[in-house]
Image: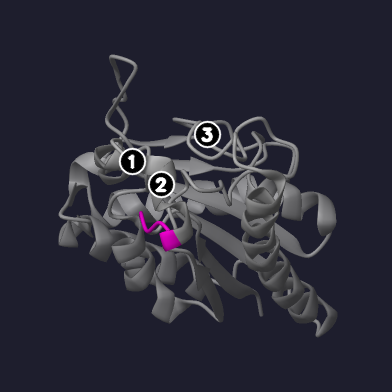
Amino acid sequence: MTALFLSCEHGGNEVPPALKHCFAGHAAVLRTHRGYDIGALDLFRTLAPLAQETTHATRSRLCIELNRSAGHPRLFSAFTNTLPGREKEQLLRFWRTYREDFTARVRACIKGGQPVLHVAVHSFTPVLDGVERTMDIGLLYDPARPGERAFCLAWRKAILHHAPGLVVRMNQPYKGISDGFPTTLRHTFPHHYAGMELEVNQKFAEHNKMNPRIAKALHASLAEVLAKGWSA
């Protein structure tokens, strides 16, 4: 039986005391989509009872970007990129701990004979650079991996059954093969692992809470697809 793993890399906008100076005069940015994925943590908690393993972070992505790989030009933000090496290394330790702990749990599960389905829970701003994103939900996957495509197609169908009228698109507003934690894990685990990113429009979130109708539909549809015995 496939094990569901959930993660939420951008769940909060917290900044450690030692980094407060980096955001002096710019605290407002932490409350925007640049600082965290609004509503994602609330949705993650709604879906968590379905999962065998979960992990989430509440430190702002503007400290260090947990969904980017080592060496990525946006691993550090404009606010932390000029920090001294020692302070950057502390942030990298946090980044490594988050990713290595989750990776170890995936490895242990696969070694124990269970394939892993990983869903990374995110949200996206309705308007970026003046351009409106017209989808409500995006399901991101690697088109070269048939199992991921099949799962996302099944999940899309189930979502629309539970919430007719939603606009659910594949590999939008981002490409599923772009740099991200699931992308890294696909390379680490070429077999018995499937990774997707769930992206929900932040127009459905208010005060960091996801619209209950959307959250309920995503929970019910995910449970439905899992119950059908989908396998990575």
Please state the horizontal and vertical placement of residue 73, each as a whole percent of the image. Answer: 66, 30
Magenta residues, start to end: 13-17
* Label 1 CA crowd tier, 10 Å (few <14, some 14–19, many 20+): few
Residue name at image x 50 percent, y 48 percent: 63
Residue 14 located within the stretch drawn in magenta:
yes
Residue 148 located within the stretch drawn in magenta:
no
- 136 vs 87, left or right, is left
Residue name at image x 71 percent, y 77 percent: 105
Q: What SS does tag 3 mark? A: loop
- 173 vs 135, left or right, is right
Work out whether mark 3 precedes mark 1 in sequence or the reverse, and give the earlier one: 1
Taking the image as drawn, is residue 165 in sight? no
Any mark on residue 24, and which? 1
Q: What SS does tag 2 mark? A: helix
- 169 vs 211, left or right, is right
Q: Amino acid at mark 3?
A: Asn
Quadrant housing residue 200? top left
Farthest residue, direction top: 130
Residue name at image x 70 percent, y 54 percent: 89
Nearer to the camera, 214 or 107: 107
Q: Nearer the viewer, mark 3 or mark 2?
A: 2
* Label 3 CA crowd tier, 10 Å (few <14, some 14–19, many 20+): many
Residue name at image x 28 percent, y 40 percent: 32
Quadrant housing residue 46? bottom left
Residue beneath disc 2 = 21
Please state the total of marks drawn on the protein image: 3
Q: Amino acid at mark 1?
A: Ala
Residue beneath disc 3 = 171
- 191 vs 68, left or right, is right
Please state the horizontal and vertical placement of residue 77, each as a whole percent of the image. Answer: 52, 36
